[in-house]
Image: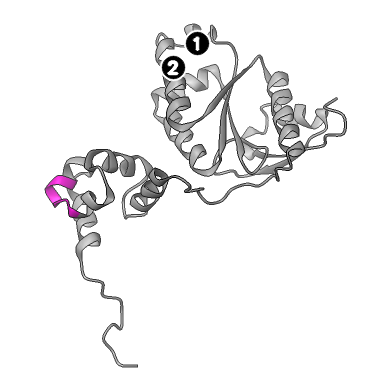
């Protein structure tokens, strides 16, 4: 059984069905609510989101580019993002010959995005950690909320949000543009050639047109 008197609600992504963790949470006394989460696998409060990864998935997500994107998105939407790795550090040597790179990546996302990294020994341990996190948040009076919009409480997040709202520019390209150009103002002042070096010629032409074409909505200039 779980902590006495604690009956937390935990939002669980539908893709976690079958992992065994939701059932273990229910046995501990948690109310499990399945939902299609846009960020993370488990939401335990308005500030804490948890991404669960097995050791093989951790390594795969680094090398296919998902890990840093997931870390960035969690930090955009939640104050306290957590990656919970199911397994042991020693298991990394078994699943990949680049274990040191995985550990370096975990250090980087901790420093760059403020992501906490926890380790569990298996499904039951994962459920107990999630249950404990949820109870602590409940005791602190934190509501359980699935955040639908980025927090945007940091300037760099606001800048990313603005740039990725441009046509053809997703989160990765937005970050690359800001890192190469240095600011939103520099992006706006860049030539097609300069933009093309980062986003490709076709996308650069479309972006340049959106940024510089005169505003001309339908019906403009007509008398009412």
Give x and y (percent) for residue 13.
63, 39
Q: Earlier in the sequence, mark 1 or mark 2?
A: 1
**Looking at the image, residue 44 lies above or below residue 203:** above
Is 194 included in the stretch rendered in magenta? Answer: yes
Quadrant for residue 61, please give it: top left
In the rendered structure, the answer to whether residue 198 lies left or right of residue 53 reads left
Which residue is at a point 22% across and 43% down the rendered structure image? Answer: 181
Tell me which residue sits at (30%, 76%) in the image.
217
Q: Check disc 1 and report the residue beneath it.
A: 92
- Tell me if I can see residue 106 in this picture: yes
Q: Residue furthest bottom?
A: 224
Q: Quadrant of the N terminus?
A: top right
Badge 2 marks a residue whose secondary structure is helix
Q: Main secondary structure of the magenta part?
A: helix
Q: Is residue 182 left or right of residue 110?
A: left
Instruction: Point out residue 56 in the picture as x, y percentages from the top left corner.
Output: 51, 18
- Which image quarter: residue 140? top right
Q: Image height check: is 194 above or below 220?
A: above
Q: Which mark is residue 102?
A: 2
Q: Where in the figure is residue 39, as x and y percent of width and height?
A: 54, 40
Gap between marks 1 and 2 measured at Cα? 8 Å
Q: Say whether marks 1 and 2 touch (CB < 8 Å).
A: yes
Q: Position of residue 69 (x, y in %)?
A: 43, 35
Q: Residue, x 36% and y 48% (percent of image)? A: 159
- Residue stretch rendered in magenta on the structure: 189-195
């Amino acid at each position: 059984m779980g902590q006495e008197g604690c009956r937390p609600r935990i939002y669980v992504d539908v893709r976690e069905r079958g992992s065994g963790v939701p059932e273990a949470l229910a046995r501990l006394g948690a109310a499990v609510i399945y939902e299609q989460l846009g960020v993370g696998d488990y939401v335990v409060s308005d500030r804490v989101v948890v991404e669960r990864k097995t050791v093989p998935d951790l390594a795969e997500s680094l090398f296919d580019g998902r890990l840093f994107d997931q870390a960035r998105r969690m930090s955009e939407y939640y104050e306290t993002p957590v990656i919970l790795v199911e397994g042991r550090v020693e298991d990394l040597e078994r699943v990949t010959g680049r274990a040191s790179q995985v550990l370096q990546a975990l250090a980087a996302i901790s420093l760059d995005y403020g992501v906490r990294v926890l380790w569990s020994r298996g499904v039951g341990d994962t459920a107990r950690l999630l249950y404990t996190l949820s109870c602590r948040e409940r005791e602190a009076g934190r509501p359980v909320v699935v955040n639908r919009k980025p927090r945007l409480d940091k300037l760099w997040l606001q800048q990313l949000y603005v740039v990725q709202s441009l046509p053809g520019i997703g989160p990765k390209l937005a970050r690359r543009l800001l890192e190469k150009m240095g600011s939103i103002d520099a992006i706006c002042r860049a030539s097609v050639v300069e933009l093309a070096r980062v986003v490709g010629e076709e996308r650069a032409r479309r972006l340049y047109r959106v940024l510089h074409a005169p505003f001309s909505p339908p019906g403009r200039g007509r008398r009412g």
